[in-house]
Structure formats: structure tokens, C-alpha cells
Amino acid sequence: MPAIPIQVTLLFILKSGFASGPFAVKLTLQPPSGEEKQIGTFPVLLEGADRGASLTLNLAFQAEEQGLYWFGLSLDRSSTLLGHERVDSTSVGWQTGFVY
């Protein structure tokens, strides 16, 4: 399959709950082959209670294989949230569905 250029805008909205203070959000990309790659680490400030933070990222990458590309989001050492994008030879589309 020839490489397909992918451009996505990711929006993550985090609610503080009991968490407060500065945190590091780590974003990863896992292609169908399973080799996880770190995209970046971003600082967020959570102020507790019902307050939160949002993170908007414009991301471009080359899809070099067919299948699901998983985006992982972790907040310091907490659980990872996963979303995915399916790439095949006929269509590309973001599918909502998060696992944590």
C-alpha cells in the first residue's frame, strides 16, 4: 500500500475531579504493526473540582500500512485513554471509541 498522508485534529477535554496541579499529558501513536511511538508531552494545569482543561492538537502523519492506528493519551502515570483511526485503501475516517 502506498503511504497515505493523514491530517487529524484531536480534541481532548479533561475534567479535574479530585486531581489538581500541573500534569504532563503524553500522546502516543500505535500503528497496526504495534510499535508504539511517542508523539509528544504537553503540560496541563488542573484546578480541581468541576474545572478542567482542554488540549487541541493538529497532527499530520504518513499511514504506511492498512489497519487501525491507535492514539494513546496518558496523564502522568494514570490510565491510558485510546482512540483510533482506521486506514484502508478506500477510505479514512476517525471512529470514536475510547478504552481506558
Image (cartoon, rainbow, N blue to C red):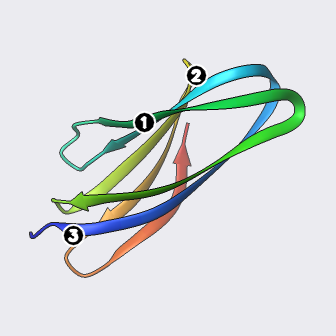
Give how far apart the Cα atoms at labels 2 and 1 are.
Answer: 16 Å
* Relative to 79, 29 lies left or right: left
Amino acid at dot 3: Ile
Question: Which one is nearer the viewer's eye here, 7 or 100?
Answer: 7
The disc, 2 or 3, on the residue closer to the chain's N-terminal end is: 3
Label for residue 78?
2
Q: Nearer the viewer, mark 3 or mark 1?
A: 1
Give how far apart the Cα atoms at labels 2 and 3 are.
Answer: 32 Å
Mark 1 Cα-neighbour bin, 10 Å: few <14, some 14–19, many ≥20: few
Q: Which residue is mark 3?
A: 4
Residue found at x 77% / y 29%: 46
| Residue found at the far right of this picture | 49
Marks 2 & 1, CB-CB < 8 Å contact: no
In percent of width and height, residue 2 lies at 10, 70
Mark 3 Cα-neighbour bin, 10 Å: few <14, some 14–19, many ≥20: some
Amino acid at dot 1: Gly
